[in-house]
Amino acid sequence: MARTIFTALDIGTSTIQTVVAEKQRGESSLRILGIGIAPSSGVRRGIVVDLDDASGAIRQSVQEAERTSGLNLKSVCVAVGGSHISVAYSKGVVAVSRADGEISPEDVRRAVAAAETFVTRNPNKSILHMIPRDFKVDSEAGVKDPIGMHGVRLEVDTLIIESSASFLKNLFKCVEVSGLSVQDYVFAPLAASYSVLSKRQRELGVMLLDIGAGVASFIVFEEGVPMHAGVVPIGGNLITNDVAIGFRTHVDVAERIKLAYGSCLPNELPKRENIRLAEFVPEETMVFSRRELAEIIEARMRDIFELLQKELKKIDRKQLLPAGVILIGGSSSLPGLIELTRKEMALPVEIGFPPATEAPDEHTAASLATSLGAIHWQEMHDQQVSASWGAYHTNALSKKPFVRWLRSLLP
């Protein structure tokens, strides 16, 4: 029976994950064949800072995925995140080409291409995605899928997700050196949305928030379409650094303390509950209040939510997302985070999980949300789904001339 193999790579600050899946012809679901997880190295806040270390960590993750899947991997879709990500907006207008005025898929593609021409080009930035948020047919606004409608003038409003050009060159080189070719790129929270969010959540209005080790990144959906996205330069590692400073200990010890005793709700902890450093470092004699640890964590989390509220205010959606906030990422497991998020964002909150059938256990599924989502992203584009924003989406970096140019930079 014919089958299609999909491979996704998620390069994070704490771990690098490779997932291999197959889709059998005639079947509706994917089957996970192999998973490779390696400690991240040479990456800080989602940015490659050491090519050799990063390539080695990618190679280790890929080899583990090859071992568990029994396949020799050739190409991969890479989930991209980090503090270098930025967003912008642009509009494009075209005349409907058919004589009878019926709008075709080609008209939509021309409108999106027109929007790209109005983008202020920065030589240090490369466009990851141009996603139609909304269409306008003549004087009729709020159109989500204009194909088949009749009109003279078609206008599109696009969300543009950009990445540092130098970052992509370095990332491309790391992946190629590790033995794989880059098939496509996808913004990490956009990828994760395919494995975590339901159609109803995307329709109602929802924020997917990924609190990783290096940064917190997000994407906002409404009426089934991505409306806004971005990155907040605060992650779990910064919280760990604050704990290390506050407890006057090494960051590795601070991370263990955070995982063992961390909480986002200091007022709900007993005042006299203490943490003895001797539990983690035998020669240490210092004792700290667990409430003090929670206050450090809460302060940094409040910083994240304050920045997120400003982002929602930009699109007039502050406290106006009926499906609330869906949390993923390593730091989403901190005790009390759901309650603190609900309080600070004034929205419903829950932890996001991919389907349990896609990973060995719930914990693994939660940690693989982005890489599993990147698999679904590939599947959708492989099927060339029509009548959805994904059918019109443009990824400038997957164009062959761009990939050939990046490959020409390799020695």
Image: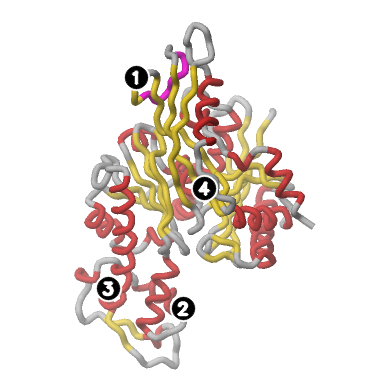
Q: Quadrant of residue 25?
A: top right
Per the model, the C-alpha gap separating discs 4 and 2 is: 32 Å
Residue beneath the point at 34% across and 26% down: 142
Q: Classify mark 2: helix, strand or loop.
A: helix
Which of pointers 1 and 3 indicates the residue nearer the eye? 1
Q: Quick check: can you spot residue 355?
A: no
Q: Quadrant of residue 40?
A: bottom right
Q: Position of residue 220 (x, y in %)?
A: 37, 43
User: Residue farthest to the top?
Assistant: 100
**278 is higher (above) or lower (below) than 11:** below
Would you name the residue on which mark 4 appears? 162
Mark 4 vs 2, N-terminal side = 4
Q: Relative to the observer, which residue lies in front, 352 or 224?
A: 224
Would you name the residue on which mark 2 appears? 251
Residue beneath the point at 52% across and 41% down: 129
Residue beneath the point at 38% across and 60% down: 333
Would you name the residue on which mark 3 appears? 295
**Marks 2,1: beta carbons within 8 A:** no
Q: Position of residue 236 (x, y in %)?
A: 42, 66
Mark 2 vs 1, N-terminal side = 1
Chain part drawn in magenta: 143-148
What amino acid does circle 1 point to? Ser
**1 is higher (above) or lower (below) than 254:** above
Mark 1 is surrounded, within 10 Å at the Cα level, by few (under 14), some (14 to 19) or many (20 or more) other residues, namely few
Secondary structure character of the magenta stretch overall: loop
Q: Relative to the observer, which residue lies in front, 357 or 97?
A: 97
Per the model, the C-alpha gap separating discs 3 and 4 is: 35 Å
